[in-house]
Image (cartoon, rainbow, N blue to C red):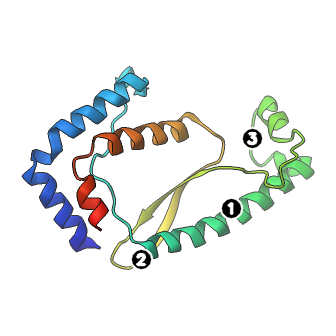
Amino acid sequence: MIREMREMIAELQSMNMDAAGRAGAMEQVKQAGIEVNNKPVAFSYVPMIVTKEDMQLFDEGIVQIQKILEKMTRHYIADPSYRTLFGFEKEMEELICLPCDDPCVIPFGRYDLFYDFESGAYAFCEINTDGSGGMSWNDSVTSAILNNFAGQDYLKEK
């Protein structure tokens, strides 16, 4: 995998790191209004390449994390004394405890991780299940990159 990433970066370097594509992605991010401190949010333009085996490994971890979060959320809803451990404002607590007809109390999430390509070890560094701005920003930035990335043909070959 490391070899493939180096090959892709070498190809991007031969295209001046796809300056035109990066500029197009940045413009799309600007148009979407994705800002931090009144500036377009910074993002990495070089994608991380993962194999199907990597994705299977991540999926297995996410399934386990999701089970834990579901159990914690159900306990949070059922036990008022447990809620005090989290320190949410009263309004947030009330929203979390609203009745939910969906069998899954956490219907979506974004799970960020650190990954060691050589050993296959990974660790979750941030778990987002609240639909926060970061989750929608991630989707918009990813779309901007994919819509402008000149290396798409290279990625399709892999």
Task: Say left or right for 62 vs 54.
Answer: right
Q: Label 1, label 2: how many angstroms apart (C-alpha)?
A: 21 Å
Pick the front one: 43 or 9: 9
Residue designated by label 2? 120
Query: Is residue 36 in view from this perspective?
Result: no
Q: Is residue 38 above or below residue 104?
A: above
Q: Quadrant of the N terminus?
A: bottom left
Task: Say what secondary structure mark 1 lies in.
Answer: helix
Amino acid on which the number 1 mark rests in the picture? Gln
Q: Residues within 10 Å of mark 1 (few under 14, many from 20)?
A: many
- Residue 46 in the image: state x and y as whole percent: 27, 51
* Quarter holding residue 49: bottom left
Q: Earlier in the sequence, mark 3 or mark 1?
A: 1
Q: Nearer the viewer, mark 3 or mark 2?
A: 2
Q: Residues within 10 Å of mark 2 (few under 14, many from 20)?
A: few
* Circles 3 and 2: CB atoms closer than 8 Å: no
State the mark number for residue 66: 1
Amino acid on which the number 2 mark rests in the picture? Gly
Pick the front one: 97 or 86: 97
Residue designated by label 3? 87
Task: Say left or right for 94 vs 121.
Answer: right
- Residue 72 in the image: state x and y as whole percent: 78, 58
Residue occupying image coordinates x 65% and y 47%:
129
Q: Is residue 138 above or below residue 2?
A: above
